[in-house]
Image (tube, rainbow, N blue to C red):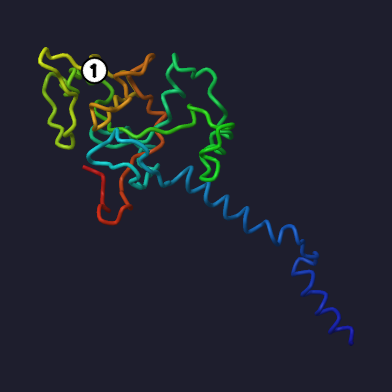
């Protein structure tokens, strides 16, 4: 073999940089790149979520798959009627143990698809909720015991609701009323299924979600195919 052929063979084996290829990086580099891309998109741009409960019936059904985008609410505050995904009240309600909030790293692990249901690492503060914004900063509101909304002195027409709280003959109900004014940089969120939604009416320490705890807004349902479409009013 001539010297030139030997040098060409060594160059191909070592690579253009002159370094020998590493079996470790040959295998793991594409995986690390893929994971980095996945977490980068998921953290900064958009992610997929599914509906685990009936709190947003009838508009959102259990097991519906949604796209949640994160760019819009970095530029502006949420608007009334938008459906938002936010950190569990266990992460910010002072009476639900928010002082023991787990690290973002732990919550990131918990939210990996294959670790979601591992009991030993799960934490209530790492969960995410989905509700509708019904009042924004500065709004004065009253939610009666049927779950009907009066906003700034006027009854709100909420066409997306068909499940209000039931009342017996004596007008008693298991649902709670709520009255107040939304503080700055907060929103009031309620489930569309007013008869079965754990929302600001029931949280023990605060009725409001800080805007900083909102992950993004749900804007598109991509599954099931027969109900695919926009979620923006």
Horizontal and vertical percent for residue 165? 19, 24
Q: Is residue 49 above or below residue 175?
A: below
Q: Is residue 202 above or below residue 230?
A: above
Q: How many marks?
A: 1
Q: Quadrant of the C terminus?
A: top left
Answer with left or right where residue 44 lies relative to residue 81.
right
Horizontal and vertical percent for residue 204? 37, 14
Q: Is residue 180 above or below residue 47?
A: above
Tell me what residue is drawn at x 44 percent, y 14 percent. 95
Which residue lies most toward the bottom here?
1
Q: Nearer the viewer, residue 119 or 112?
A: 119
Tell me what residue is drawn at x 25 percent, y 20 percent. 138
Instruction: Identify the secondary structure beneath mark 1.
Output: loop
Q: Is residue 218 above or below residue 164?
A: below
What residue is disc 1 on? 174
In the rendered image, which quarter is residue 128 located in? top left
Q: Quadrant of the N terminus?
A: bottom right
């Amino acid at each position: 073999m001539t010297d030139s052929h030997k040098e060409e063979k060594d160059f191909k084996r070592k690579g253009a940089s002159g370094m020998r290829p590493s079996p470790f990086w040959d295998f793991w580099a594409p995986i690390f790149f893929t994971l980095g891309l996945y977490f980068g998109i998921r953290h900064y741009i958009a992610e997929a979520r599914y509906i685990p409960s009936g709190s947003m019936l009838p508009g959102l059904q259990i097991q519906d798959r949604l796209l949640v985008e994160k760019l819009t609410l970095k530029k502006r505050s949420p608007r009334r009627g938008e459906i938002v995904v936010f950190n569990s009240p266990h992460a910010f309600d002072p009476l639900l143990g928010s002082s023991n909030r787990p690290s973002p790293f732990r919550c990131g692990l918990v939210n990996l698809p294959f670790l979601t249901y591992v009991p030993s690492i799960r934490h209530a503060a790492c969960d995410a909720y989905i509700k509708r914004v019904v009042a924004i900063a500065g709004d004065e509101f009253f939610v009666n015991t049927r779950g009907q909304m009066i906003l700034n002195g006027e009854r709100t027409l909420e066409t997306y609701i068909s499940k209000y709280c039931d009342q017996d003959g004596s007008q008693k109900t298991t649902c709670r009323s709520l009255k107040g004014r939304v503080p700055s940089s907060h929103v009031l969120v309620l489930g569309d299924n007013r008869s079965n939604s754990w929302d600001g009416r029931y949280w023990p320490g605060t009725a409001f979600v800080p805007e900083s705890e909102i992950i993004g807004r749900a804007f598109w349902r991509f599954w099931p195919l027969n109900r695919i479409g926009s979620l923006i009013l």
